[in-house]
Image: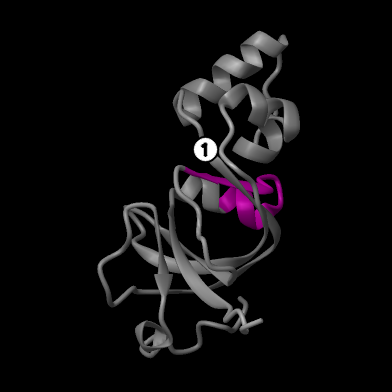
């Protein structure tokens, strides 16, 4: 059996959701595509207006694609969106569909997250996510230091 090499990835995430990840309210990151190679650390690139790498999360399990109804049933809206939605199951499902769209998504569990001093990304940021090579992180001085 050959060794699996752990790597890093960069995820583009809106500021609101990044804050919910750092606070521990959002425990699941949702994506249309998911990494096929195990990732050790998922760096959080906050999109406009900040446009900086602000921290990272340690990914856990990556689940196969699920629709919003299955996501709601398995995780609940609070873990997926980082907020509690009041109302019936149908109202909560509508809130999920409004926030996420009506398409199947992979769920990536978040074990823990750490904020770091914001650092400018010296490469073009990904639309969703991308693998990150060590060379791409060369200019990220002090990136591993928590704030």
Position of the N terminus, as image quadrant, is bottom right
- Does 42 sit left or right of 80 as displayed? left
Observer-nearest of 75 and 5 = 5
Magenta segment includes 5: no
For the record, the magenta segment spans: 19-31
Image spot of residue 139 (x, y percent):
36, 88
Image spot of residue 69 (x, y percent):
63, 22
Eyeballing the image, is 115 above or below 85? below
Position of the C terminus, as image quadrant, is bottom right
Q: Residue furthest front?
A: 1
Q: Residue at x 37, y 88 (%)?
A: 135
Magenta segment includes 29: yes
Q: In this figure, which residue is indicated by the disc labeled 1?
A: 105
Eyeballing the image, is 108 above or below 51? above
Q: Residue at x 44, y 48 (%)?
A: 14
* Rendered image quadrant of residue 87: top right
Observer-nearest of 135 and 146 = 135
* Rendered image quadrant of residue 119: bottom left
- Does 121 sit left or right of 45 as displayed? left
Observer-nearest of 80 and 108 = 108
Image spot of residue 89 (x, y percent):
71, 13
Image spot of residue 84 (x, y percent):
70, 28
Binning the other alpha carbons within 10 Å of mark 1 as few (below 14), some (14 to 19) or many (20 upward) gives many
Q: How is the image coloured?
A: one colour
Q: State the SS at label 1.
A: loop
């Amino acid at each position: 059996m050959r060794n699996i090499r752990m790597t890093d990835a960069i995820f583009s995430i809106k500021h609101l959701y990044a804050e919910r990840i750092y606070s521990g309210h959002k425990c699941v990151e949702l994506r249309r595509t998911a990494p096929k190679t195990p990732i050790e650390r998922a760096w959080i690139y906050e999109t406009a207006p900040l446009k900086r790498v602000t921290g990272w999360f340690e990914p856990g399990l990556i689940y196969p694609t699920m629709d919003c109804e299955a996501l709601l049933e398995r995780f609940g809206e609070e873990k997926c969106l980082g907020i509690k939605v009041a109302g019936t199951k149908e109202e909560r499902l509508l809130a999920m569909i409004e926030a996420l769209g009506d398409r199947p998504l992979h769920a990536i569990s978040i074990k823990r997250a750490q904020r770091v001093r914001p650092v400018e990304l010296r490469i073009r940021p990904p639309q969703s996510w991308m693998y990150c090579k060590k060379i791409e992180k060369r200019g990220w001085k002090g990136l591993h230091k928590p704030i």
